[in-house]
Amino acid sequence: MRNDSIERAINDAALTITDYILQKIEQIKRQKDLDTKRFINQEIKNQQRDFPFLSTEEQAEVEYDSYYRLIKEHSPELFEITGDPIETFPFDKNQGVFQIFEDKNQFFGVYKQKTKEAHKITPVFSSKKDVLQKTVGTFRFEKFRKYSFFLTEDGKAFSLDENKHLRLNLSKPFKILTTYENIEQARIALVKEELKKNPKLLKESLYRTLEENHIPCDLLGKTVILQNISKDDKGIQLSLEENQKERIVQLSDIAEKWIEKIRDNPGMNIVFDEIIMDSRSIAEGFLAFYEQGLNKEMQVQQHNFEVIVTEEGSYIGKLSSNGIMKQISPYFSEKEAHKQLENLAHHIQLEKHKERQVEKEWELSIEVIELSEKA
């Protein structure tokens, strides 16, 4: 009995010591994470102080580079990634992606930026849905033209674009930076960005849209002085001055940031294009032009059909001028949806070729009839 008591006492002591050691390891790990994050935050403050001339985008990259070097040295376990990527979300303009990995029925989030090694940015969860819900606050999403949008319960949408808090893994809860009233507005904003990259098409679409909305075209490209702004049931009335002449412009709507800016800074100088391009009616005009102009001239999209990826699956859709996406196929896997889009494009090309052949035959038959009549 005495030996049994001693053995139990030794076992109990060993368990207590083991538990104590494990607690200490966990405490050291937490302190290590805390110290790392404190150090990163301090580095960020120092960079902001020492390099105030850097743009927001450049500052974000400097911050990420600092974070990357630190975790590479002090947290190498974040780079030990096993399993396979099951979902990829385009992340930002620097060609970064947020990926969800699965390893033996465990799921976790990873960030990968071009030229850098991927690293973990989330704990381990039991499902893909949980990774999204616990990390970005929602599991509903849409991937549209290589961009990722997430949908909230109240119908709003947001993107991960340029969100340093996620890739730095510094903020909890996740901070949403770029928001839209709905997914339609998000799509419209993206189309506007696409058009801005082509000066010729941008100018054409602006003129077309201003004419449709009865807005003076002669102000395009000019710097104006914004004096006052008022809002009522009819829309937005903008009082401005151009070349010492007072002008009144009526818009159906405008971004809230401009209403606040003009009210706080009467007499501010601004290029007219910049403010009107934040009007939703202008954005819808962009989309209308996109369908009729961009596709005809550049053939950027295949007959205006494209693959849309959601949490339910992937489908082929067609974008309308108000940002609504019409689903024209059942759900597929993402890979299969792209294959079906290629098949659809090929089918349309064949049909167009047949139509051209019929037109030529018809024209030829007309010529034969005319020649026989002359004879």
Image (cartoon, rainbow, N blue to C red):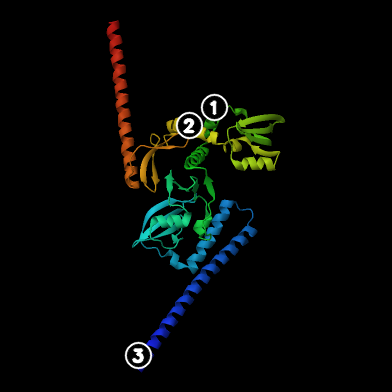
Residue 206: x and y, percent?
55, 32
Whether residue 115 is visible to the viewer of this picture, yes or no, is: no
Pointer 3: what residue?
Answer: 4
Locate residue 349: give its quadrant: top left
Locate residue 292: give its quadrant: top left
Q: Is mark 3 on a helix, strand or loop?
A: helix
Amino acid type of the residue that numbered disc 1 sits on in the rendered structure: Glu
Mark-to-mark CA distance, 1 and 3 = 93 Å
Amino acid type of the residue that numbered disc 2 sits on in the rendered structure: Ala
Residue drawn at x 61%, y 43% as measured from the top left: 257
Residue drawn at x 31%, y 35% as measured from the top left: 346
The first of marks 1 and 3 along the sequence is 3
Nearest the eye: 229 or 97:
229
Q: How crowded is mark 3: few (under 14 residues within 10 Å), some or many (20 or more)?
A: few
> Quick check: 50 above or below 186?
below
Mark-to-mark CA distance, 2 and 1 = 11 Å
Check the picture and name the quadrant holding the C terminus: top left
Residue positioned most to the front: 1
> Quick check: 268 above or below 173?
above
Residue 283: x and y, percent?
52, 36
Q: What element carries label 1?
A: helix
Q: What element carries label 2?
A: helix
Mark-to-mark CA distance, 2 and 3 = 86 Å
1 or 3: mark nearer the eye: 3
The first of marks 2 and 1 along the sequence is 1
Q: In this view, does 275 lie to the left or right of 300?
A: right
State if disc 1 and disc 2 touch (CB < 8 Å).
yes
User: Which disc number belongs to residue 212?
Assistant: 1
Whether residue 25 is visible to the viewer of this picture, yes or no, is: yes
Pointer 2: what residue?
Answer: 288
In this figure, what is the number of numbered marks? 3
2 or 3: mark nearer the eye: 3
